[in-house]
């Protein structure tokens, strides 16, 4: 990436969506980079050279975790009740005239 590295890109994405299923691809011997990526929010990593079955497995796990969190957040939001704008406008306290 011309203007940033994968760790910084991960941080920026996580600032927008903390549950984003980010996976890092790195070469053997880059253990510190993997740790930095996980600390930044990456959900997993794949070592080069990439084997198709390993890549599929890592992607499936990250997407499943992302969908699970999305459903949980969606379920929590739909179970919350908020006053409607018309209700909250009529329920404001009023000043007594006495």
Image: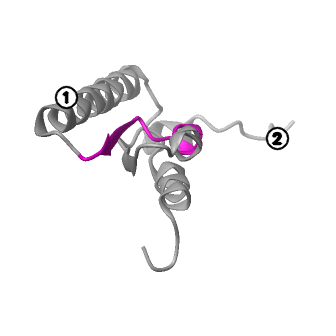
Viewer-side residue, 41 vs 69: 41
Q: Residue furthest bottom?
A: 2
With respect to residue 6, does 51 lie above or below?
A: above
Q: Which residues are magenta?
A: 36-49
Q: How is the image coloured?
A: one colour
Q: Which residue is mark 2?
A: 97
Q: Quadrant of the N terminus?
A: bottom left
Residue 83: % across, % down: 47, 33
> At x 17% / y 39%, what residue is drawn?
51
Q: What element does badge 1 sit on?
A: helix
Query: Which residue: 45% across, 79% down?
Result: 2
Frontmost residue, 36 versus 28 = 28
Q: Residues within 10 Å of mark 1 (few under 14, many from 20)?
A: few
Residue name at image x 46 percent, y 55 percent? 13
In percent of width and height, residue 73 lies at 38, 28
What is the count of numbered marks?
2
Judged by depth in the image, the label closer to the viewer, 2 or 1, is 1
- Based on the picture, tell me whether residue 37 belongs to the magenta stretch: yes
Q: Residue at x 35, y 22 (%)?
A: 72
Marks 2/1: CA–CA distance: 70 Å
């Amino acid at each position: 990436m011309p203007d940033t590295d994968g760790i910084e890109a991960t941080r920026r994405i996580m600032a927008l969506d903390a549950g984003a299923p980010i996976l890092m691809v790195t070469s053997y011997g880059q253990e510190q980079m993997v740790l930095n990526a996980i600390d930044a929010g990456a959900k997993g990593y794949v070592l080069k050279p990439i084997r198709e079955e390993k890549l599929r497995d890592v992607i499936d796990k990250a997407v499943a975790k992302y969908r699970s969190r999305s459903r949980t957040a969606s379920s929590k939001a739909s179970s919350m009740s908020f006053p409607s704008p018309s209700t909250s406008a009529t329920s404001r306290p009023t000043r007594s005239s006495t």
